[in-house]
Each structure stands twice: as structure tokens, then as C-alpha cells.
Image (cartoon, rainbow, N blue to C red):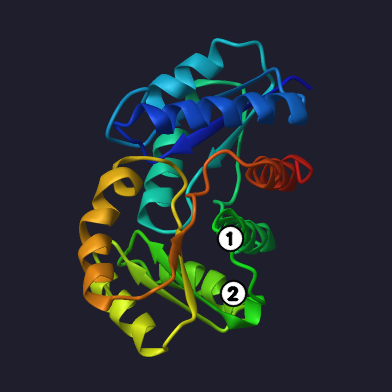
Amino acid sequence: MKRGLLLIDRGSKEREAEEELEKICLKVKEKGKYIFSEYCFLEVVPPYIEDGIAKCLNQEIDSLTIVPYFLYPGKKVKAAVTEAMKFQTKTKVKFLVTKPMSMHKTLLELVDNRISAALKKNNVDLPKKDVDVLIIGHGSMDPNAQISINYIVDGMRKIYRNADRCFLEIEQPDIASGVESAQKNNPQVLVIVFYFLHEGAHVKTDINQDLKPALEKAKLKHVYITEHIGVDEKMVDLILERAQEVENAN
């Protein structure tokens, strides 16, 4: 069977986000042995879903695995899947839709790795049980999204002294409140996790507009910030695992 794969991302105006997706798609194509692996966006910038589907259907394939590339389930994922499936009636190519990138142990490993890398980069030789963690997520009104980030926080609480979360927008606690709460725990070291897929505007600009003044006010001595998720072999493997779940069932 000739298979193709399409990642549907939310979308970003930052070129770095597209560069990351290009690298991820290349790795997915090679490791998954697909005829091709493409990406498109739900919103913000083209290629939109219609463009991505059209490009895929120009290829000689029997099935197309569609991957909602989102860290949280919710309205955005539903919108992406609904839009993509509109085109199923116009083709004999079978569409297979995976779960999003949420509620999976790989994400726990990836976040732990990002924290460890930040500590190592800053020559911090401290047991994990003595390190505090604050995870910054995007924020959503969808309760499933809250369950998803709480899964990550709960996983980190089993490893680190303290772990909590705050949000860039939409829900509480906001970043200022998150930092204030972390300060009350008197951390020896606080590692702040940017729980975002890409180096988009949120990572490059928006978070720091709130984070920098919050940290200045808190006057914490040892604060380190992780890299965002970006291009990582673990994410590539998670995409392939999600894809294989639906491919093996059909």
C-alpha cells in the first residue's frame, strides 16, 4: 500500500516554526517509509488544510494518515479534523486520522529531558528531588486541554521537588501568578519549561513579556529556562506511533 502522511499544525507567522515542521516531516518520511510527509496549517498562514490535502491527493497514494499536531485535545483539534475530512468524499484515497500529541509517556520523557538539558547547560549539579519546575502552557477553555497539561505536571511531580503550571493566556494562573506561587516554595533552583511545539511568536516574544517582569519582581536567585519542544526524535517517534495506531487498525 502506498501511504502518505499530513501533519496539521495550528499555524505560525514565524519562519522558525515552518523550518521545524520541514525537518520533522523529513524525519517522519524516512523513519515511517512514507511516499511523502507534508504539513499544513489550521489558521494564521498558508498552506492551509485545503492546500495540504490538495497537494497530498496529487500524489499516487492509497491512504493518507492525517496527524493533528497539537499538544492538547480540544476545539482546535476538532476543527482541524473536521476541515480535513470534508475532502474524504472527493477522493478514493482513504483518510486515517490519528490522536493528537497529548497524554503520552513520551511527552513526560521529553519534558524531563528538556529540564535536564537546562540544568546541565548551566552546570547545575543538584538531585532532581531538590529542583522545582514551573511549566508554561498556552491556555485553553477546553477541559480536555487542562487534563492534558495536568498529566505532564503530575508526571514531573513524581521526579522533582515541586512542579506546577501556569498559562500564557485564556486561563489562570497566569505567568505572574505562577512565578509568585513558585517563589513561595523557596526553590533552590527553579526550571521554567516552555511547553510549546514551535519557536513561534509565543516562545520568542509573548511569554517573555510577562515572564521577565515576574522574575524581576520575584528576585529568585537560580532560574533556568528550557528549550521549547521543537525538532526532537522522541516527537518523531510519537508521530509515527500515533500513525501506526490507526494504520494497523485498518
Residue at 56 percent across and 52 percent down: it is 101
Image quadrant holding the C terminus, namely: top right
Report the amino acid beneath label 2.
Met
Above or below residue 48? Residue 120 is below
Say which quarter of the image contains residue 40: top left
Residue 138 position within the rendered picture, expressed as x and y whole percent measured from the top left: 34, 59
* Along the line of sight, the residue nearer the viewer: 234 or 126: 126
Q: Position of residue 165 (x, y in %)?
A: 41, 73
Q: Could you say which is closer to the camera, residue 60 or residue 34? A: 34
* Amino acid type at image mark 1: Val
Q: Is residue 86 something that shows in the picture? A: no
Q: Residue at (58%, 56%) from the top-left corner? A: 114
The disc at residue 156 is 2
| Secondary structure state at the residue bearing disc 2 | helix
| 22 horizontally vs 50: left or right | right
Q: Are dots 1 and 2 in contact, CB under 8 Å?
A: yes
| Residue 232 visible here | yes
Residue at (40, 40) in percent of width and height: 199
